[in-house]
């Protein structure tokens, strides 16, 4: 029996679909009662609970063989996930499969990567068996710009002319499912998950244009202006700063590395950006006239 956390998010929604299709025994920890109801209606076992409440995590972990651990970006991530790992250990869970991030290492220039490194180390030292998934930038992040793409035919990111080996989040879910289905084969390993090619954002814009029928331009943003707009849009300082650090690392070339790990685990190439652009073309397409 598997406990899936983050099962209502970008990776988790796809992971739940894959595990259900394969008839695997799993339950989802969900904090939102309305989302829990939707999952139950789809035949998924749900335990209502909050990752920030270790006792609720411990109850949800009863009889579990593997904890799939995912929580959103947060400066408290290490504290929250550390307590969840402790709860899993107390409940007798032998292994954890955790979503970390590309570039996770102590001393990394990007705060989000340092937080992931701290939690990775904590898990490695926990005595539990583990598998770490370290995905690159998600293609799905571009969905955040859907309204400016549709409205203005442009999106703006402070990435300059950086090339990024973005990954389709559906591949992260597919790798997670493969690991959860055969955990012993992946025990105590870390996978660096990237797409199969590093593209510049203007090249991604070209592919979105080709598939959506909307001419789309990438406009490299000035980092200071981008920071100001993120804060004006309500992003907390830690997140705006973290995103600016991430894009600065991309401008230094840190996002361009392509790995073979998706292929190693799945036996197929990662989904191409073109496939992402085709599959989400309706999100980027201009509204149809009545
Ligand atoms: N985006 C990227 O480019 C990227 C790249 C590399 C790594 N990552 C890593 O991927 C992870 C995020 O994955 P994602 O994008 O799939 O997540 P997401 O879409 O942000 O979803 C977060 C999930 O966690 C759940 N959740 C949040 N707080 C919770 C709590 N206190 N208790 C229980 N559940 C809680 C959410 O539930 P609700 O539905 O109730 O909110 C949701 O299911 C992060 O660790 C991030 O660093 C992201």
Image: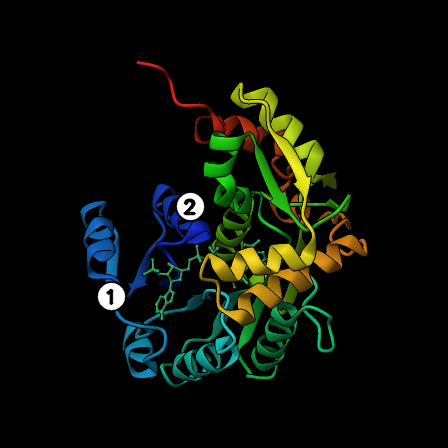
State the residue position of label 2.
14
At mark 1, the secondary structure is strand
Of residues 95 and 60, which is closer to you in this image?
Answer: 60
Classify mark 1: residues with Cα within 10 Å, few (<14), some (14-19) or many (20+). many
Q: Quadrant of residue 90?
A: bottom left
244 displayed left or right of 95: right
Question: From the viewer's perspective, is residue 54 above or below residue 1?
Answer: below
Q: Position of residue 127 (x, y in %)?
A: 56, 83
Indicate the secondary structure of the residue bearing disc 2.
helix
Is 29 left or right of 128, judged from the image as shown? left
**Quadrant in the picture for the C terminus:** top left
Give the residue displayed 66% in from the left and 27% down from the top.
206
List x then y, in percent, for residue 97: 51, 65
What number is the disc on residue 22?
A: none
- The circle on residue 47 is 1
Residue at left offset 45%, top offset 66%: 71
Q: CA distance from mark 1 to mark 2?
A: 18 Å
């Amino acid at each position: 029996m598997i406990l899936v956390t983050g099962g209502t998010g970008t990776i988790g929604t796809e992971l739940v679909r894959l595990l259900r299709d394969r008839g695997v025994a799993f339950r989802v920890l969900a904090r939102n009662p309305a989302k829990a109801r939707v999952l139950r209606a789809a035949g998924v076992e749900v335990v209502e609970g909050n990752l920030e409440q270790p006792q609720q995590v411990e109850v949800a972990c009863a009889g579990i063989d593997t904890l799939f651990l995912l929580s959103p970006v947060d400066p408290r991530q290490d504290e929250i996930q550390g307590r969840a790992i402790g709860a899993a250990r107390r409940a007798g869970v032998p292994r954890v499969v955790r979503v970390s991030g590309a570039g996770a290492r102590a001393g990394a220039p990007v705060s989000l990567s340092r937080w992931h490194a701290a939690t990775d180390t904590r898990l490695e030292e926990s005595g539990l068996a583990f598998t770490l998934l370290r995905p690159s930038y998600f293609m799905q992040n571009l969905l955040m710009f859907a309204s400016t793409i549709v409205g203005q035919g442009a999106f703006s990111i402070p990435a300059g002319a950086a090339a990024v080996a973005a990954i389709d989040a559906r591949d992260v879910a597919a790798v997670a499912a493969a690991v959860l289905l055969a955990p012993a084969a992946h025990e105590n390993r870390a996978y660096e998950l990237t797409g199969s090619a590093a593209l510049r954002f203007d090249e991604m814009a070209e592919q979105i244009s080709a598939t959506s029928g909307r001419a789309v331009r990438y406009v490299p943003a000035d980092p200071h202006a981008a920071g100001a707009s993120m804060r004006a849009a309500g992003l907390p300082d830690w997140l705006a700063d973290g995103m600016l650090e991430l894009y600065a690392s991309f401008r230094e070339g840190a996002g361009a590395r392509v790995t073979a790990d998706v292929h190693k685990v799945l036996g197929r190439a990662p989904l191409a950006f073109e496939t992402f652009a085709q599959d989400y073309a309706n999100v980027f397409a201009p509204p149809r006239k009545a």
